[in-house]
Amino acid sequence: MVAALIFAGGAGRRMSSRSKPKQFLEMHGKPIIIYTLEHFEYHNGIDNITVVCLAEWIKELEGLLKRYGITKVVRIVPGGETGHDSIYNGLAAMKDLSRDKDIVLIHDGVRPLINAELISASIEAVKKYGSAVTVEAVRESVVRSRDGENIFDVPPRNQMYVAKAPQTFYFGDIFKLYKKAEEDGVKTIDSSHLCSIYHMPMHMVQSTKNNLKITEPADFYVYRALYEAMEGQQIFGL
């Protein structure tokens, strides 16, 4: 079985939106979270979806799923204090539906510019290598600093990548790491960071172009421009 875990439990404080969280902001009348979920809903390789959501917005999400015909969502789980906690909550809720060798794609609810090819490539990479972390090569030099003021290292740019999503694993492997982190009091930025801490091997999968995470107001406007450009390509054959 292949499942998707979509975490949309953040309040989106950096979006400066007083009316609703960033995942529920609308573009052309449709919430961002629905654009994201549709990629997994329409993919033949995905069997079910678990969504981690802000507790006070769960009923709103349930209504949206019915409105837009999203049928693969089997449960909605309240989010945690951090993104790490939200993923752990989602994996824990999936335990009774998942076996260790089932595959789970962990994805941001506010990262809607993926496609079926990336989902398929992630699934196949786990079958072949045991894990799949979506990455994109950096376009500028990366510097490292210990104190936030002085640079002590500039790694070779051709070795530097940005970790994106989905990040895909066998359920038993990634849930074991999140349980270990819970016991150790460890909090991580994302699943790749967790795997790095516990020295779990990770295989890279090349990201789609413009695999943007909508975090700040400018991201929303970039996303809208990119989406409209892609729509224009389909309509006009550009």
Image: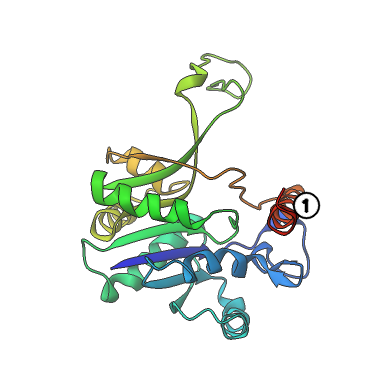
Q: Position of residue 165 (x, y in %)?
A: 48, 50
Residue 9 appearing in the image: no
Q: Residue at x 72, y 66 (%)?
A: 25
Q: Position of residue 222 (x, y in %)?
A: 74, 48
Q: Position of residue 104 (x, y in %)?
A: 35, 60
* Most distant residue in the front direction: 237
Q: Residue at x 68, y 66 (%)?
A: 21
Q: Quadrant of residue 234?
A: bottom right
Q: Residue at x 49, y 17 (%)?
A: 155
Q: Nearer the viewer, residue 142 or 151?
A: 142
- Would residue 141 be found to the left or right of residue 199 on screen? right
- Would residue 160 be found to the left or right of residue 24 on screen? left
Crowdedness near tag 1: few (<14), some (14–19) or many (≥20) residues, C-alpha within 10 Å: few
Residue 236 appearing in the image: yes
- Would residue 208 be found to the left or right of residue 184 on screen? right
Q: Secondary structure at mark 1?
A: helix
Above or below for 123 versus 56 = above
**The N terminus sits in image quarter:** bottom left
- Residue highlighted by disc 1: 221
